[in-house]
């Protein structure tokens, strides 16, 4: 009986994984420039962390979490997103007491959501994200958005759109909440069961419904921007001012709400405008979450961050036909002829690798022609040929596969001489 990969997951094979490695390397380099430090949290956490932080009325908590009970009867959940675990660690490890504030962190790793698999969307996906905890300065909102935008630009994407919104403070949200209830309540029976349940628990989430997005009441729903108090309005204007100063293009979308309960004030998404990218255009989403640290037991601490899917970034690169500068090929391939020469190449291969070369040899006892074909498939720059005669005469011949030129080296000084010749 064959065992297949679980639905909604993928094997990332050699030839593709190099793209992932390059993206991960670029993300880490960029975080270094912005002074964000890596944090690694568990893949599973106590379920309560997500119900309290993400929100027990969200689709993630109600429908998408991989929740299980361990042998001790504790409810655990595979992490569906990265922010909650980072904030839990921030509180538990007392990072709020660090001398350097705000605490700026980034993470990269697998997340898990039980949802319908489709193009660019998986049940196990890799998320890169950053969190800045400890500052209520709108300048850091602009910094976080600029970091995400810079990564996409560095990867070569051009067809990008940034949309931002303000969800306001608690006072503004409560006023907007009451207006939404009054707007939708007379005709809520025309909406899906999820929206009907959300009317009194979290009416803002109705605006994010995929089933009823074309309903006429959606187009006339009161905007959060109409209910921002003076403080929230001033904050949002400052964020826009900073983004303009950074020459980062953006649009204000009053319908942008994000799917998690912990957001307030700034919310943003970065989307792909590439032809053929698909119906789901969002590449990255994030925003401010003042109050979340307190929700998981910490002191009053403002925060902001984003999360982006590596899978969707790769899909956007493919849609724009961006060729990544992947390192290909090896430096040298050792072709051995005869048992003694083959045995000698084992030691020589190890010495070449220790000297800093990417090198390979034959392990299938193939003929010399087949070994040259293997070197060609590996995109080797050079092939070193060692036979019984060369071994007896203390020499080795090296052929450049680009020029066809062949050079003879002393076998006992080969590593030093070859290294000098290619530097």
Image: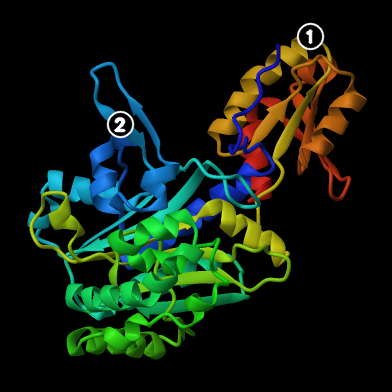
Residue 326, position as x, y percentages in the image: 65, 53
Give left or right: position of 396 versus 230: right
Report the label total: 2
Q: State the image quarter where residue 252 is shown.
A: bottom left
* Circle 1: element type: helix
Q: Is residue 183 above or below residue 336?
A: below
**Residue at (14, 44) in percent of width and height:** 92
Q: Which numbered tag is attached to residue 76?
A: 2
Observer able to see residue 340: yes
Looking at the image, residue 68 sits to the left or right of residue 16; the answer is left
Residue situated in front as seen by the camera: 122 or 423: 122
Residue 330 is situated, as x and y percent measured from the top left of the image, at: 70, 40
Residue at the extreme top = 339
Q: How far across and how far down the image is residue 44, in percent?
A: 33, 34
User: Residue 256: image x %, image y %?
Assistant: 43, 73
Rendered view: 300 above or below 396: below
Labels 2, 1: front one = 2
Q: Residues within 10 Å of mark 2 (few under 14, many from 20)?
A: some
| Residue under the point 54% across and 78% down | 216
- In the rendered image, the residue lying farthest to the right is 369
Tell me what residue is drawn at x 14 percent, y 52 percent: 95
What secondary structure is found at the residue carrying circle 2?
A: strand
* Residue that mark 1 sits on: 339
Question: With 26 as the anchor, is 39 left or right in this view?
Answer: left
Circles 2 and 1: CB distance less than 8 Å?
no
């Amino acid at each position: 009986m064959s065992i297949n990969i679980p639905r909604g997951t993928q094997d990332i094979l050699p030839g593709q994984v190099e793209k992932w490695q390059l993206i991960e390397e670029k993300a880490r380099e960029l975080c270094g420039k912005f002074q964000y430090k890596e944090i690694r949290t568990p893949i599973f956490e106590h379920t309560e962390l997500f119900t309290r932080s993400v929100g027990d009325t969200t689709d993630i908590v109600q429908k998408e979490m991989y929740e299980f009970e361990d042998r001790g009867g504790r409810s655990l959940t595979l992490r569906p997103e990265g922010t909650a675990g980072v904030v839990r660690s921030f509180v538990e490890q007392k990072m709020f007491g660090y001398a350097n504030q705000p605490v700026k962190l980034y993470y990269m790793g697998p997340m898990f959501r039980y949802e319908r698999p489709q193009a660019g969307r998986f049940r196990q996906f890799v998320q890169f994200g950053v969190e800045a905890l400890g500052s209520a300065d709108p300048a850091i909102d602009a910094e976080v958005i600029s970091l995400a935008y810079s990564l996409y630009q560095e990867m070569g994407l051009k067809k990008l759109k940034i949309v931002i919104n303000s969800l306001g403070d608690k006072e503004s949200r409560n006023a907007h909440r009451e207006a939404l209830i009054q707007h939708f309540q007379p005709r809520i029976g025309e909406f899906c069961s999820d929206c009907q349940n959300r009317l009194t628990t979290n009416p803002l989430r109705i605006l994010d419904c995929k089933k009823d997005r074309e309903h006429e009441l959606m187009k006339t729903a009161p905007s959060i921007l109409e209910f921002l108090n003076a403080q929230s309005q001033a904050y949002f204007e400052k964020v826009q001012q900073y983004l303009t100063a950074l020459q980062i293009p953006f649009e204000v979308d009053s319908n942008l709400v994000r799917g998690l309960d912990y957001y307030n004030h700034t919310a943003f998404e970065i989307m792909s405008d590439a032809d053929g990218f698909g119906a789901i255009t969002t590449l990255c989403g994030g925003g401010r979450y003042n109050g979340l640290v307190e929700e998981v037991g910490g002191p009053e601490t403002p925060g902001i961050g984003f999360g982006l899917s590596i899978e969707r970034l790769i899909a956007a690169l493919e849609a724009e036909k961006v060729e990544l500068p992947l390192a290909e090929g090896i430096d040298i391939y050792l072709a051995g002829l005869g048992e003694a020469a083959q045995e000698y190449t084992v030691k020589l291969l190890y010495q070449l690798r220790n000297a800093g070369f990417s090198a390979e040899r034959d392990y299938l006892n193939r003929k010399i022609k087949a070994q040259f074909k293997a070197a060609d498939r590996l995109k080797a720059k050079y092939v070193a040929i060692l036979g019984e005669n060369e071994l007896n005469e203390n020499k080795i011949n090296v052929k450049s596969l680009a020029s066809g030129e062949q050079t003879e080296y002393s076998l006992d000084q080969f590593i030093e001489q070859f290294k000098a010749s290619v530097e």
